Amino acid sequence: MTRSRLAARIALAIALTAVAAVAARSDEVGVSADGILFGQAAALEGPSSALGQRMRQGIVAAFTEINAKGGVHGRKLRLISRDDGYDPDRSVAQTLRLIDHDKVFALIGAVGTPTAMATIPITSAHNVPFIGPFTGAEFLRDPELSNVVNIRASYSAEAEAWIKHLTEDLRYTRIGIFYQDDSFGRDGLSGVKRALAKRGLELAAEGTFERNTRAVGSAWRMLKRAEPEAIVMVGTYGPCAEFIKLARRSGFHPTFVNISFVGANALARELGPDGEGVVVSQVVPFPWDASIGLVADYQAAQRAFDATLTPDFVSLEGYLAGRLAAAALEKAGPNPTRIGLLRVINEIGRFDISGSVVTTGTRMLDTPPKVFMTVIQKDGTFKAVDRL
């Protein structure tokens, strides 16, 4: 064999190996030679749209930052977002569309407990990673749901923090609850009841409202009769703001405490001057504190993505979910698979994101995510507090 023929065969072998390697890399659904496709089904329109939109903004800011640095193992991260209107049936349809039609590698940044309850059976059956859902529902912490990647604290942890501060800092004993009458609200209700029972207390009163409505009058009358010292709130920004404004107009001023899912910034905007003194628990760092490395990187990424955006808690959570997905993909190696990504997330369970440690899987039991309190100020800004 001549040297020229040998060289030609070697060149052909190298070319075929390269083609095979590319083909192997692109066999996984949602993974191509130059990209990895993520999907989001969330409320992008309607009464809870600020939650889905802000989650999307944070994720895209993170992906834009990662892509500007070359992506992950040479692949750019991309996101398709589809509107489910915070409706379980629509969420099922959009989730199936993302998996079957759009062929996404993983789902990220879903919004809501009732929507998650409807879609989790689908994602689990397809073994599609379900990363960073914007919900603290207890059922998502089931070890059997190996495809679910939780980042935030549970609603039970938030409820425990509320009741601890209300009973220890303010010495309150009469506490009522206003909650959304579905799986989300009832999850929060259960957490509050457990936290009160630990202290030998019971709820003073309960009031409910229907999802995607602002029909809060009946709940207001129910709670007003009990005259609670504090009302804890498990809902989205629209109905919670409506309830608080109704109370203010009636001359009733209990301490209002809201769950993180409410969408703190959207709540403050809805309330305007009625927001002063309203408490919101949070599960991510203070998004205006640039002394925290994660927050500084988030602010820079958000400015690079869209300079008109302002920091807020929800988009920071989206950013954190996006950064975690990228960090896990980096550790999963150059040939990512869904199974490989989930194995990395569940087995490593500890990721350093710009100096902030994020725990996942069973590691969350040993080092649970933090919950802290913020209070809306007169000008609509937030102040982080250690005591109420």
Image: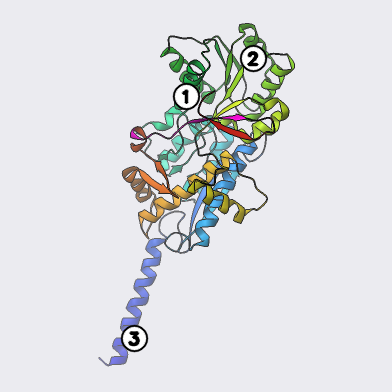
Is the residue 275 above or below the residue 106 in the image? above
Binning the other alpha carbons within 10 Å of mark 3 as few (below 14), some (14 to 19) or many (20 upward) gives: few
User: Disc 1 marks which residue?
Assistant: 161
Q: Amino acid at mark 2?
A: Ala
The structure residue drawn at horizontal position 47% and vertical position 24%, both measured from the top left corner, is 161
Spot occupied by residue 51 in the image (x, y as percentages of width and height): 60, 37
User: Disc 3 marks which residue?
Assistant: 8
Quarter of the image with the C terminus in it: top right
User: Disc 2 marks which residue?
Assistant: 219
Describe the element under mark 3 as helix, strand or loop: helix
Q: Amino acid at mark 1?
A: Ala
Check if residue 372 falls in the magenta segment: yes
Quarter of the image with the N terminus in it: bottom left
Give the residues drawn in magenta, as a range.
Answer: 366-376
The structure residue drawn at horizontal position 64% and vertical position 53%, both measured from the top left corner, is 306
* Marks 3 and 1 in Cβ contact (< 8 Å): no
- State the residue in front, 221 or 388: 388
Spot occupied by residue 177 in the image (x, y as percentages of width and height): 56, 16
Check if residue 45 falls in the magenta segment: no
